[in-house]
Image (spheres, rainbow, N blue to C red):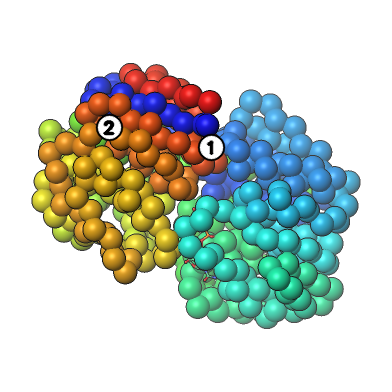
Amino acid sequence: MNRYKIEGGNRLKGSIDVHGAKNAALPILAASVINSGKSVIHNCPDLSDIQNTIKILELLGCSVTREANTVIVDSSNLCLRSIPKDIMVKTRSSTMFAGALASRCKKAYIAGHGGCCIGSRPIDIHLEAFREMGMDIKEDSGEVMCFASKMKPCTVNLRFPSVGATENIMIAASLTEGKTTIINAAREPEIQNLADFLRSMGVKIKGDGTGVISVWGTSCPKDAEVTVIPDRIVASTYMCASMATKSPLVINNVNVRHLSGFIATIRKMGVSVICLKNSLSIFPPDRMINVPYISTAPYPGFPTDSQALISSVMCTSQGLGIIRESIFENRFGHCHELLKMGADIETKNGFACIRGVKKLSGAIMNSHDLRCGAALCVAALGADGISYISNVNYIDRGYENLCQSLKNLGAKIERIE
Ligand code: UD1
């Protein structure tokens, strides 16, 4: 059993540093295969999803070393191989290797694509775009073969601004000479971080951070270097822990611009947030007020990854709040667990209706996915009594030792293997 035991009701205090963003580091690691040389990736978090992605790189013949927070990938000896399905399904980044291998080796073989079970998560938008870019795609029972000997610059129009598809297309276009344009591209900060990395290889990219991105590929990419942006979802997790425990905290190594949608919402709940350039201080009131309606949305809207976390806080905030999950169809697993703590929540057709109760009580719960697990920790920290949360290996996918970090802030939490 891998679980946390949390004794709730204790105030937190002090400051915490946020590590690099998983969702930025994963596509950057996948893209590191395209330059046939060295990629130096600073501020790369040490998470199980990252370790699994490094395993994929090593299986492909890359040499990967880590010195503290810097990961160096040397892809000069890359050899095209099929990656065993059991490794591929462990991380969503496996999908990103399709664009990277197709552009470098003219062939890619993807057997299954991973990530948390928060919806069906098809990759049809990726594959439609690849076809428009001139790839020949064959699909067979979840296995995908990409043949990319005739890639051509083109304009692809995404029917939804998928983060993963935008990244995959940018990577695939990076070795295609000429201009590839992505219309209705995702605007997430992680996209800009990937663009910075590809630019450092010599790829020309314009428009990242907007809905139209243009990529001018290069035939001779150079050694590359990038610093991974701070993880905005991890930052929002510590902010929710502060709110659930009514404890002021200082959160360092954040990019407050990336948190604007989240901060705007919690300010409406009565929380005071003071933002400096790379840090913020958060001062929650004794009881927050639920905002009537939150809808998750692509960036710069309220992030779907912070939805479970804010749900936990809303359970004890005053009044009625409705959450609409508009990105993934199966992202309310935490609500069923929060009911065990005495929360008043109803979920139906993509909506969660939360009526704030005065207190939650400790309970025995199960994490169904990464953010569900983190949200249950937040709720347990603010609850009366002891909670047990199982399957915390999900949490390891996205948080560098969450248990120790919370302990350093004064939480009574331990990991029981
Ligand atoms: C990424 C993040 C994830 C975050 C999500 C939305 C990584 C590793 N993961 O996931 O944490 O929650 O962005 O901000 O970066 N869709 C399709 N067909 C496709 C692609 C997507 O229908 O080909 C749908 C998905 O099922 C989902 C929605 O589009 O309903 C959003 O998916 P997408 O933006 O692609 O998210 P991911 O890249 O998988």
Q: Measured from the top left, where is residue 87 in percent x and y?
A: 71, 48
Q: Measured from the top left, where is residue 120 in percent x and y?
A: 52, 66
* Residue 69 tag number: none
At label 1, counting other C-alpha atoms closer than 10 Å, the crowd grade (few under 14, some 14-19, many 20 or more) is some
Residue at horizontal 50 percent and vertical 78 percent from the top = 159
Q: Measured from the top left, where is residue 312 in percent x and y?
A: 28, 44
Judging by the rendered image, the residue that carries numbered circle 2 is 362
Can the viewer see residue 15? Answer: no
Q: How many marks?
A: 2
- Which of the two marks, 2 or 1, is nearer to us in this view? 2
Q: Is residue 340 left or right of residue 299?
A: left
Determine if the C-beta at disc 1 is less than 8 A from ligand 1. Answer: no
Can the viewer see residue 189? Answer: yes
Q: Nearer the viewer, residue 322 or 179?
A: 322
Q: Is residue 80 above or below residue 143?
A: above
Residue at horizontal 32 percent and vertical 51 percent from the top = 336
Q: Is residue 18 above or below residue 264?
A: above
Residue at horizontal 59 percent and vertical 33 percent from the top = 46
Tell me the amino acid under the disc marked 1: Asn
Q: Measured from the top left, where is residue 113 in percent x and y?
A: 64, 59
Residue at horizontal 19 percent and vertical 50 percent from the top = 344
Circles 2 and 1 in contact, beta carbons < 8 Å: no
At label 2, counting other C-alpha atoms closer than 10 Å, the crowd grade (few under 14, some 14-19, many 20 or more) is many
Q: Is residue 253 left or right of residue 283?
A: right
Q: Nearer the viewer, residue 24 or 243?
A: 243
Q: Is residue 301 left or right of residue 217?
A: left
* Residue 393 tag number: 1
Q: Quadrant of residue 244?
A: top left
